[in-house]
Amino acid sequence: MKTGFSLQKPVNKLLQKQISVKSLIAIILIICAVFFGYYLHSGRPKPGDLITPTQLFVIESALQKDLDRSVISPALIDKFRSRGITLSSQATISVEQKKHRWILLNREEEGSGIYVLQKREDEIQVYIQPGLGIKELIRLVKKELQDSELELERKHEAALFNIKTFDLEISFVVRVAYTQKGMLEYQFITVDSEFESGSEKIQRIQLHMEVVQPETVRIKPSATPLKYRPDEIVSPDTIRTPQ
């Protein structure tokens, strides 16, 4: 015999409420997971990202480390001129000495033919070819400097450049690429100062390099005796080394 009371409907309603709560929790978890994944992904580098001041400092430190303690010699300038490369942005790496004056400090033993000079008012401009990566720029500058100095040593000639400071400005864009292992990495690509792109922003670093060098350099004058007063300012153009 049927009665007017049944447990079926309340049980069904309870189950429906439990299912609804579980579904709601699942939906909330899915939404949270989506937003969390987006948050993680948004913190990763993407093509077109601008680099941070911290990354700029890292680049500056790398340049400073590899360019310090380097002597720039006339042989380096002559090397580029002999290749027909002008001192402009067309050169891969080249240097130009803007002004140069030497002060004679003293002469050693009479007849030794060795003078001690000190360099004054040095200015160096470094030009780079657009399209070089900054790491490649560092490597090429270092290699050219080393090669030129080794050549001078081979010829038993003294380096006439004693650079204490110089300024370097780099124009570059930041690109993100995938490595062979599928990892993302930043690429700092140097560009011409007039480079234009709708999707990439040019960034610039102005570096003031402090180069640690000895206070004096030694040179061998020509066979013809040169008479200088200790306080006389001389130009390296007047100094010749024995051939």
Image (cartoon, grey):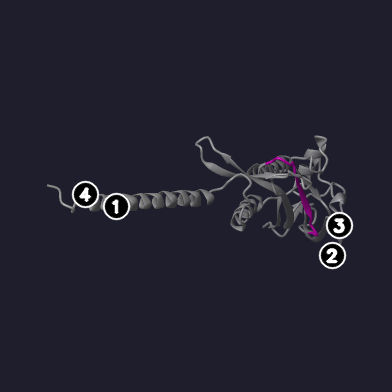
Badge 4 element? helix
Dot 3 or dot 4, earlier in sequence:
4
Residue at 64% x, 43% y is: 139
The disc labelled 3 sits on which kind of residue?
A: Val
Residue type indicated by callout 4: Gln
The residue lying toward the viewer, choosing from 219 and 32, is: 32
Q: Mark 4 or mark 1, which is nearer the start of the sequence?
A: 4
Q: Amino acid at mark 2?
A: Asp
Residue, far bottom: 231
Q: Which residues are magenta?
A: 120-132
Q: Are marks 1 and 3 in contact (CB under 8 Å)?
A: no
Which of the numbered marks, if any, corresponds to residue 231? Answer: 2
Q: Find disc 3 in the rendering and name its residue.
A: 234
Per the image, the residue denoted by label 4 is 8
Residue type for callout 1: Gln
Query: Disc 3 and disc 4: Cα gap in Å?
Result: 111 Å
